[in-house]
Amino acid sequence: MRKIIIDTDPGQDDAIAILLALASPEDIEVLGITAVAGNVPLALTEKNARIVCELAGRPDMPVYAGCDRPLAHRLVTAEHVHGKTGLDGPVLPDPTMPLQDGHAVDFIIDTVRNHPAGTVTLCPLGPLTNIASAINKAPDIIEKIQEIVLMGGAYFEVGNITPAAEFNIYVDPEAAEIVMKSGAKITILPLDVTHKALVTRARNDAFRDIGTPVGIAVAQMTDFFERFDKEKYGSAGAPLHDPTVIAYLINPDLFTGRYINVEIETQSALTRGMTVADWWRVTDRAPNAYFIGDLDADGFFDLLTQRLARL
Ligand code: BDR
Ligand code: CA
């Protein structure tokens, strides 16, 4: 059983990750959800997080708003992928549950401090601005965090927002660098694995066939989200990036990776936000992350579909 904070910028794939976590109480206790600017601006990501909690029947879930822009640069968003709202596809009602008072960064700090050391896992699914801000403000939390399991970066797949960089890292490379150098235990789910978690037609039908509001909404989200990757990569369907983080927590045996050194490029105009991953161990730089490379895609989709059917 893991206690987690989901730090997120929903995003259809973020939404499905949140739903998977909330559908898995025997494996995961979600202590709260913290929103960050990323796929769309903060006012939409915090709203979308609340929409998703209500869809899951969890209006009691604490949702906090965090940083509205990256540490050092202007915000880059991804409406071209996720649509104007960030959650285009299904028509879902505006949330009535409240946004919590207080800042997401303080919620992260207080939650880690108020739990026994090694019992809170952070799950960043967007740019790392909130997490880096918490580390900067309260470095004492680093050794208390059980693990940071994040979606971001790539090695073999290189980039999706630029030829060299994956979106979450590209939006705030300075934040990513702080996290990677923090010394916390880190697991990374990069594009190398998420581009193997593709919603084929049969997998989308399986979501829709659940027949519940959650199953139908998830099918509509992936219907919308898939057009971008199909056009760009010629792939079979939408890559479910962020749900891999939650699936990894539930069943790490579905995934394989390597413990390696990962550094973030923050300087070069051409490769800013690149995750320089020493997959082949050709440097003597110390390993700082477990970098996932592959997954059992059928096992992942079976788990996801079974769990979503519970909501
Ligand atoms: C990541 O960027 C966002 O568009 C997705 O939600 C995911 O977190 C993939 O590069
Ligand atoms: Ca995301």
Image (cartoon, rainbow, N blue to C red):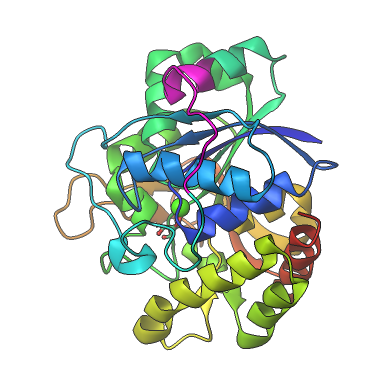
Is residue 143 among what the camera can see?
A: yes
Q: Position of residue 213 (x, y in %)?
A: 67, 62
> Measuring 44% from the left and 61% from the top, which residue is drawn there?
154
Whether 260 is drawn above or below 178: the answer is below
Q: Position of residue 236 (x, y in %)?
A: 53, 86
Q: Which residues are magenta?
A: 94-109
Left or right of 190 on screen, residue 4: right
> Measuring 46% from the left and 50% from the top, which residue is drawn there?
10
Question: In the depicted view, which residue is nearer to us: 308 or 171?
Answer: 308
Left or right of 173 on screen, residue 66: right
Question: In the depicted view, which residue is nearer to us: 263 or 273?
Answer: 273
Position of the C terminus by quadrant: bottom right
Whether 175 is drawn above or below 208: the answer is above
> Measuring 78% from the left and 58% from the top, which residue is drawn there?
307
Left or right of 104 on screen, residue 28: right
Q: What secondary structure predominates along the stretch shown in magenta?
A: loop
Q: Position of residue 264 (x, y in %)?
A: 34, 46
Badge count:
0
| Residue 49 is a magenta residue | no
